Structure formats: C-alpha cells, structure tokens
C-alpha cells in the first residue's frame, strides 16, 4: 500500500471542484479532497520531466495509472459559503476604486470554505513502487505547499505500509463505489502527459481553463455514513431545499406538486416517464416498489417546528442506472414547484440545511419513528398486523417492537387533520397514525411506510431514545 498523509495546517480547505465558484453557485467545497489535486500538487512540486536529480517523472506516471484511492477523511465537515467582495485589479485603469489611484475593482467570488473536525486526510493506493520512486514521491511531497486554493496550506508525507497497518476509522472511510452518491475528481493513466501538454499550451498561447478540464475523470464514492448499496432498498439521486419553509400540514400538497413538476419535466427532457415513476402500473408489475416523493419536515430537535424545508425523490434499487441519471438531471433542472392551492415554492440550491441533508434521512439505525403519520391501506383499525404488513410492503424486515399513536412521538412531528392525509383531487380518507419501530438489525433509510408512502406520508426519522417524547 502507498499511503499519502495530509494535514491541513489552518484546519480549513477551499477548492473549486467543478468551476462553479466563479459563477457564485458553488454549494460545497469539494470534500473530500480530490486525488487529482494531489497529483497536480506533486507535479507542481518538481515538474514532469525530472527537473532535479532526485526525480524522473516515472513515479508520477505510476501514480496516475493507479486505481482511485480509498480516502480517510472527516465524513461531515462544516461548509461555509464565503461572501463576495470587490478588490483592486493590478492593471492600470481610470480611477474607479476609491482607495487605489488608477485602479478599478473586480468582483471576487471565493466559493466555499470547508472546516473538517479532523484536519488529517489519508489517501491509500493499492500500488507497488520501487524504493527510488518512493524517495522521489517523498521529495515531491515535502515541497507541496498547499492543496486547492493558496489559503489551504498542507503538510504531505508518503510511506509504504502493509495492509494491516493502514489504520483509520470506518466512519471516515470514502470508498470508490459505482452506486455511491458522492462524485470525486480523480486521475487516470496518461494524465501527467496531458497536463504537461496543457501547461505548455497555456505558456505559449494562453489555453483556456476548459481545455485543461476536458479529460478529467470523475468517480463515484460511497460516503462513510452511507450503508453499502446491497443493503439499501433504494436511493435518492437529488435533495432539494426550498427558499422558504412551509407548514408541515401541507406535506401531501408539496409531494403532489413535486410529482407533477417531475413528470412534466421528465416528459419534456426524456420522453414518457417509466411506470415506477408515474405509478400507474398493472397488477403484479411493480411489487409495491414505486418512486416516493418525500416532503422533508424539521423534526427531532427540541426546537423543531415540523415545517417542510425541502423535498426528495426516492428511487427503488431495481431501477436501471440510466433511468436514475435521467431523473437526477430532471430534478436538478427544477427551479420551482406549483402547488394545487395556487402557491409556488422556489428551489434554493445555494445552501443546504440539516433537514434536507442526506445524512438526516439515510444512514442505518434500529430505531425509526414517523415524522409524518402513516396512512392505512385498509378501512380498518390500525393494529400490529397492519404495521407488520406496511413494513413488508415497503420491503422492510418485520419489526421486533413497535408503538402506535395518533399523536407524534418526535419533537416537531406533524399532526395532520384527516383531510390533510389525502393528495389533491382525492376525497377518500383512511385511518392513519404515528408509529415507532425497532428492528432487530439496523435498517438503511429513507424509511417510509403505509399506503401513502408514494406521497411521503409515513416518512420516518432515525431516533435516539432521548429524542422520543413518549
């Protein structure tokens, strides 16, 4: 194993993974640090052609050709959007800057600063290198001053370790996974020559930034807090946050508006929506697993008020990857939702709250409690048989313990009127209740139960026993 250890000396990291910082629409700081940035920093430390007697450039080729590394990094750092500001340009101009003579101002959008709780990051490559190449990489690593922007100073060391001595914590492990939801820029075989050519072109002709990014590969990583794909019943490709929250009583209306907007946009961009998305299926075609349009309420905190801060669409695990990507692009293009009561919700992509974070609803837990009440599939009293049936229909194991109540168990849990449990255009109401579930083994979220789970009713949150009001 070839291991690079990084320590961010200021305890912060700032980068621009996709060029969105210049547009002012960057929402994260590119965490975890990209392996492509590590390779670029090593190249910058001593060039590509062996500028000194200690390096030859061959060590860079071996590193670039290696498989994407496993990354040990903070699973949930703080992302701080920095304020835009004007600074004086270096070029001479008419006096338009009050503090500087013959200078003009230029708008600077610094993007997002990441503050990890643990400033140490480790890249673990499954590659063998010679002693000479290891020494050359060590020489380069010692000359790396920063990673990302220049205000992210870093100390880099490299070593060769045995498998059993790599170390690290499981809750800090980012693993390459085709089913992962985190996208990280990586390097590939031939990158060193391409980047050297791009630098040469820039030196001579001023090549654009887009030309240097054209060949940059990207790899899906599994977040440390996400369960393995084979344990998940489905996934959420995009999480939406609203510009302003709305009352939790409008959960079904919001879910219905999200579905209508998604189907209309999907039809426009990709043709007829599949049956798992629109929900009109023949008997036996779907086996209960359809897309779920989720309104996300603020629950679980002592000061939670149950207001809906965003929404998401859950996709069954069996859906083909191409269809998932089509849905993701559709959701990413939605700017607002038109609701049945005539109001409109604007999507805000500039920042994300805890309520609309994947970490809030995914993860794994034994104990789950409804944030929105679950609606029965029959006109009968809700009992243990009904709850077990709901779990089976949702693809969940049978709970070992459960509770049923008309009142919420969680702080901020939404208490709906019977008419608020039906979606717009429908007049029929059914029994409903809040439910607390405990499973024998941890279950991966999002967990949604009941007959109205396609419209988000029955959405559950992982619950710490001390958060439970009952």
Image: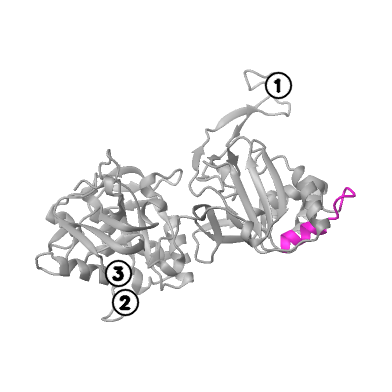
Real-space CA distance between mark 3 and mark 2, rounded to the nearest whole angstrom: 19 Å
**What residue is shown at x 45% (from left), y 67% (from top)?**
229
**What residue is shown at x 75% (from left), y 49% (from top)?**
42
Is 111 on the left-hand or right-hand side of 427?
A: right
Residue at disc 3, secondary structure: loop
Give the mark, 3 or 2, whose residue is nearer the N terminus.
2
Is 285 on the left-hand or right-hand side of 141?
A: left
Residue at disc 2, secondary structure: loop
Q: How is the image coloured?
A: one colour
- Seen from the viewer's position, the closer of residues 462 and 45 is 462
| Residue at numbered disc 2 | 286
| Residue at numbered disc 1 | 102
Give the mark, 2 or 1, whose residue is nearer the N terminus.
1
Q: Can see residue 34?
A: no
Magenta highlight range? 50-65
Asked whether 54 falls inside the magenta stretch, the response is yes
Tell me the number on the disc at residue 397: 3
Q: Nearer the viewer, mark 3 or mark 2?
A: 3
Q: Are marks 3 and 2 in contact (CB under 8 Å)?
A: no
**What residue is shown at x 29% (from left), y 63% (from top)?**
439
- Seen from the viewer's position, the closer of residues 360 and 227 is 227
x, y (%) of residue 315? 38, 66
x, y (%) of residue 365? 35, 57
**What residue is shown at x 16% (from left), y 63% (from top)?**
426
């Amino acid at each position: 194993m070839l291991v690079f250890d990084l320590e961010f000396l200021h305890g912060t990291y700032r980068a621009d993974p996709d060029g969105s910082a210049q547009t002012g629409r960057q929402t994260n700081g590119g965490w975890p640090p990209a392996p492509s940035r590590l390779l670029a920093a090593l190249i910058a430390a001593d060039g590509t052609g062996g500028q000194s007697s200690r390096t030859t450039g061959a060590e860079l080729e071996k590193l670039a050709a290696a498989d994407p590394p496993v990354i040990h990094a903070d699973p949930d750092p703080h992302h701080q959007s920095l304020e835009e500001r004007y600074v004086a340009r270096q070029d001479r101009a008419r006096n338009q800057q009050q503090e500087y003579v013959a200078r003009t101002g230029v708008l600077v959008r610094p993007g997002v600063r990441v503050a990890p709780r643990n400033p140490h990051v480790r890249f673990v490559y499954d590659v063998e290198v010679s002693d000479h190449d290891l020494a050359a990489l060590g020489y380069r690593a010692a000359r790396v001053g920063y990673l990302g922007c220049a205000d992210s100073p870093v100390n880099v060391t490299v070593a060769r370790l045995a498998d059993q001595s790599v170390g690290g914590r499981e809750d800090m492990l980012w693993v390459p996974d085709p089913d992962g939801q985190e996208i990280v820029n990586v390097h590939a075989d031939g990158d060193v020559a391409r980047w050297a050519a791009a630098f040469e072109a820039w030196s001579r002709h001023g090549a654009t930034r887009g030309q240097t990014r054209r060949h940059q590969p990207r790899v899906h990583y599994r977040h440390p807090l996400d369960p393995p794909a084979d344990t998940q019943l489905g996934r959420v490709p995009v999480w939406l946050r609203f510009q302003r929250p709305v009352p939790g009583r409008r959960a079904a209306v919001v879910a219905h508006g999200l579905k209508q907007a998604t189907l209309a946009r999907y039809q426009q961009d990709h043709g007829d929506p599949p049956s798992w998305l629109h929900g009109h299926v023949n008997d036996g075609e779907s086996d209960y697993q359809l897309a779920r349009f989720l309104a996300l309420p603020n629950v679980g905190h002592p000061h939670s008020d149950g207001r809906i801060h965003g929404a998401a669409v859950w996709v069954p695990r069996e859906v083909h990857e191409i269809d998932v990507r089509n849905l993701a692009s559709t959701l990413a293009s939605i700017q607002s939702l038109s609701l049945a009561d005539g109001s409109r919700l604007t999507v805000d992509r500039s920042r994300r709250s805890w309520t609309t974070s994947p970490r809030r609803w995914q993860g794994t837990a034994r104990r789950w409690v409804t944030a929105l009440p679950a609606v029965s599939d029959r006109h009968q009293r809700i009992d243990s048989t009904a709850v077990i049936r709901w779990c089976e229909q949702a693809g969940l194991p049978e709970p070992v313990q459960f509770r049923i109540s008309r009142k919420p168990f969680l702080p901020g849990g939404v208490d709906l009127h019977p008419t608020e449990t039906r979606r717009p255009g429908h007049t029929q109401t059914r029994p409903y209740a809040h439910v607390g579930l405990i499973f024998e083994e941890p279950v991966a979220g999002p967990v949604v139960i009941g007959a109205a789970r396609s419209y988000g009713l029955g959405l559950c949150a992982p619950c710490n026993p001390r958060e439970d009001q009952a």
